[in-house]
Amino acid sequence: MVEPLLQARGLQKRYGGLVATRDLDLDLYQGEIHAVIGPNGAGKTTALAQLSGEQVPDAGRIVFDGRDVTALSMPHRARLGIARSYQVTAVFLDFSVLENIAVAVQARARHHFHFFASAGHDDTLRKPAEALMREVGLEGLAHRPAADLAHGQRRQLELAMALATEPRVLLLDEPMAGMGAAEADAMGALLERLRSRYAVLLVEHDMDMVFRLADRVTVLVDGAVIASGDPAAIRADAAVQAAYLEEST
Ligand SMILES: Nc1ncnc2c1ncn2[C@@H]1O[C@H](COP(=O)(O)OP(=O)(O)OP(=O)(O)O)[C@@H](O)[C@H]1O
């Protein structure tokens, strides 16, 4: 039987009197996009933050590739291959697209003796950076300063920088937020291309995108899982329908 690459068991997280994560179990497999959905405040971001190491659970454990990582810091987990995009990636606004990606490649390769400013000119950094730039669809913008990118392009850049760390797990918190339809569509197509090589956990409010992309969907309400399964089963689930109906009334 295939083991999950990332596994959470019995996660609990309280903020004062509020239970943000309630006995959460979650399995994430290589080659899948697993969407976590739920009404506002359901605890999606908090769950993701515990998987990345940004938040420490009060109870429960997280296992990555057979190793208990519950006590490991976010940088340590990142080095093992758990990448959280968007919240942690620092884009250098004055640097070009290519230089930003090269810096991320450099951080992975630990080329300690290069200056940041030369990162775009070093072949050992430039070649993988160019490949990542093509992968996320930013070719043609190599020398554009990051500050000049459109919102969707910035997110593509951030994803390229996350991929530069050679992760195995991608934790994505609303990668389509604030995007226009065309940008969201391009991001969706990109995630479809990445699916086979990574394990992708996707927190996303855009339900059309969730049902287009996800192999499996887990639904959180008040910090607890109320349903988990393939998209068709989730659509048909009475408790899920009730949760979303409550939210819209
Ligand atoms: N640092 C914090 N301190 C106190 N309460 C918090 C903190 N972070 C989150 N919460 C609370 O925990 C609950 C879950 O929040 P979380 O952001 O995880 O939900 P979410 O499902 O991601 O919401 P949304 O869809 O609105 O982004 C909410 O009630 C929120 O107000």
Image (cartoon, rainbow, N blue to C red):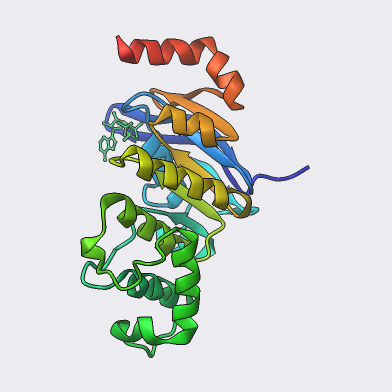
Furthest residue toward bottom: 113
Q: Which quarter of the rendered picture does the N terminus lie within?
A: top right
Q: Position of residue 213 (x, y in %)?
A: 53, 37
User: Is residue 236 visible from the viewing direction of this image?
Assistant: yes
Instruction: Give the residue displayed 55% in from the left and 46% down from the top.
Output: 192
Q: Position of residue 223 (x, y in %)?
A: 41, 27
- Quarter of the image holding residue 121? bottom left
Residue 18 appears left or right of 36: left
For this rendering, which residue is in front, 195 or 224? 195
Q: Which quarter of the rendered picture does the C terminus lie within?
A: top left
Instruction: Give the residue displayed 49% in from the left and 50% down from the top.
Output: 190
Q: Is residue 49 above or below residue 225?
A: below
Q: Is residue 235 above or below residue 6?
A: above
Q: Position of residue 244 (x, y in %)?
A: 40, 16
Q: Quadrant of ligand 1?
A: top left
Q: Is residue 39 above or below residue 49?
A: above
Residue 73 appears left or right of 66: left
Instruction: Give the residue displayed 43% in from the left and 61% down from the top.
Output: 160
Furthest residue toward front: 140
